[in-house]
Image (tube, helix red, strand yellow):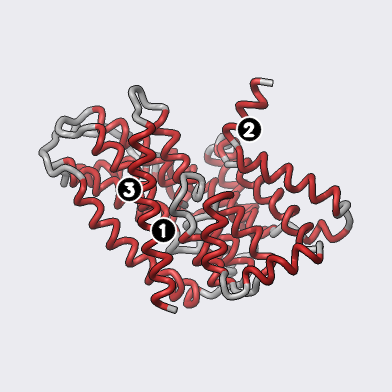
Amino acid sequence: MRRIISFCKAQPVLVISFFAAVVTACIIPPDREYLGYCNRSVLIELFALMTAVGGLRSVGLFEHATKLLFRMVRNVRQLGVIFIMLCFVSSMLVTNDVALLTFVPLTLLVFQKISGAGEREKILTIVLESVAANLGSMLTPIGNPQNLYLFDFYHMGMVDFVRTLLPYGTIGFVCLLLLTLLLSPLPCNTEEQIVKPIPKVQTGGYSILFLFCLLTVFRVVPDWVCLIVAILVALVLDARLLLKVDYALLATFVCFFIFVGNISRIETVRTFFSVILNGREVLVSALLSQCISNVPAAVMLSGFTEQGTALLLGVDIGGFGTLIASMASLIAFQFYRNEEHAHAGKYMLWFSVVNFGMLLVLLGMNYIIK
């Protein structure tokens, strides 16, 4: 029983999506149409991308980048800005959750070893890292799972994608830079980071796999080729990578595919969502994301509207706000909460003020642009 409770706490979205799939399966019994529910390309792309990023992370690529940037640090604010920018830039390529999984633990470790930084600076830096990761990830199709899914589901082109999200990402980035002024300018001393040399063969192999992932996302390479390359690269270079893939996320997608496929076959439900979404895709998807997270919101609502870019914008904006609006933000909080003498209440206060502020700014911008 304890294991079940622990699992539910660790994977709440997966548990909810599983029960949602089971309930709707009782209404719409399994049949041949179930085979068409799952988006195979998205599942393969996610699997391959997580394998490639896991490999690049294992060879110490991110630690080397951090070491180079540390040489420019003179005060607490600069230190925080470096970590925040690392999350912003890296999330465009390795997804927002991986960026935070990589840099939040490193942030906590470094703040333990420097003078001139208090708990406020640590909390604010991690909060801004989560904002930066969500902002950066919204600017590329591979930045987060909902972008990858919607980019494939609606067969979007890069021009439409960039045209939709770049203005919001730019304004959000300006707001992020202004928020970094809240960090203390007091001097700090950082210890020299000792990292192992990067193995060239492994790094080259994982980089090639990452290239295949990009080519698959942009529909240059078939998804089945990408899957074969991912498995071969992992087996040859480090088979343990296959165990580190976030299969819970893949299972969550499968459950939501089943859930959405079933409810879209219920006439009253389809009519309700079609009516409520009509002309309100951005607002409805942003608000729904506050309750069930933006990845499930994207999968759920995609079955009821043809306005792909509006839905894309809504779920990406919806990643700001509550702690569960983006699972990446929840990851950052979990790391901080596990710290000794953590101030969860202070963290939630800063997080709520910053994230709801960003949510209001971006939603307001949407109505101004309209």
Q: CA distance from mark 2 to mark 3?
A: 28 Å
- Mark 1, Cα crowd under 10 Å, few <14 / some 14-19 / many 20+, is many
Give x and y (percent) for residue 316: 48, 60
Residue 277 visible, this orientation: yes
Q: Mark 2 — residue?
A: 8
The residue type indicated by label 2 comes to Cys
- Left or right, 17 with respect to 193, comes to right
Q: CA distance from mark 2 to mark 1?
A: 28 Å
Give x and y (percent) for residue 344: 38, 32
The residue type indicated by label 1 comes to Leu
Of the image marks 2 and 1, the number of the one nearer the N terminus: 2
Q: Secondary structure at mark 3?
A: helix
Residue 212 visible, this orientation: no
Q: Mark 3 — residue?
A: 128
Q: CA distance from mark 1 to mark 3?
A: 14 Å
Q: Mark 1 — residue?
A: 359
- Left or right, 187 with respect to 275, comes to left
